[in-house]
Amino acid sequence: MTFSHLDHPTRPAALVTGGAVRLGRAIALDLAAAGYDIALHYGHSAAAANETAEAIRALGRSCHPVQQDLTVAEALPTLVARAREALPGLAVLINSASAYQQAAIATTTVALFDQQLAVNLRAPFFLTQAFAQQVGQGQVINIIDNKIAFNQFQYAAYLLAKQALADFTRMAAVEFAPGLRVNGVAPGVVLPAVTRSAEYIAWRVTGIPVQRQGQVEDVTQAVRYLLSASFITGQILTVDGGESLTNIGQNAAQFDPQKV
């Protein structure tokens, strides 16, 4: 079953970047369940995008997959335009697409640096700009990372991009108010890479105050909350079980001269 934008021209719609897989997929499906039609952006995951689109349509919502390489800066305004043309009720932009590669400062290449910043910072920046210009009224939610609370140099380019995205979220909230509300969600251990072992996850959980791994529902609930909370803008909602609160640094209370 397929839908066109003529089916529900006034129903609210959301553009979800990276919406074909993982957390982006979960957010897209949850928004569809909440009544949104979905412009489903994907980069190279065409098969996954089609499968996710069918799942959204099975919920009775329209879904329009849109392919775009987010490293092509000139095409970003067109991505918003294509989504709005297909779904005139476009009112929400979820910047969920992410590039994640481990590399310390000493081993980061120029190509890796540029790619990490292009996807994780430049794309949300110019998609938000285009959304403000073309839509003007609505909401933007940036999916960030609880790593922004730490100085994990092992992920230097990725983390710098996400930290800048958090600052951009606050900056954009001021510039584009009152037409747009701009917020962020910073997940912790929710959907680890498939390469992460059970032992690794168990080890990570020991550093989480609530002593459990997060679920995708924890993040989708946060997104829904921000969409409904009309007096909140420029905020980063950290969804990590308190993990980002545990790095207190070295201090006198911890000092043991016997161990120096």
Image (spheres, rainbow, N blue to C red):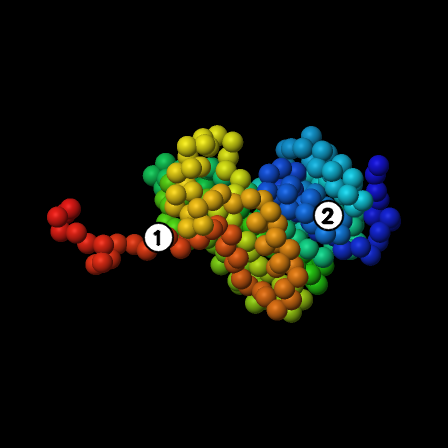
On the rendered structure, is 84 left or right of 171? right
Q: Which residue sits at x=38%, y=41%?
A: 154
Using the rendered image of the protein, determine whether residue 205 is visible from the camera's viewpoint: yes
Label disc, if present, on residue 32 of the rendered structure: 2
Specify which label sits upstream in the sequence, 2 or 1. 2
Q: Tell me if residue 244 comes above or below residue 56 in the rendering.
A: below
On the rendered structure, is 166 left or right of 256? right
Label disc, if present, on residue 247 of the rendered structure: 1
Across and down, in percent, residue 64 comes to: 76, 42
Q: Residue furthest left?
A: 258
Q: Secondary structure at mark 2?
A: helix
Q: Residue furthest right?
A: 6
On the rendered structure, is 185 left or right of 211? right
Callout 2 amino acid: Ala
Callout 1 amino acid: Asn
Q: Tell me if residue 34 comes above or below residue 203 in the rendering.
A: below
Q: Dot 1, how many residues are within 10 Å of its Cα: few (below 14), some (14-19), or many (20+)?
A: few
Q: Which residue sits at x=53%, y=40%?
A: 191
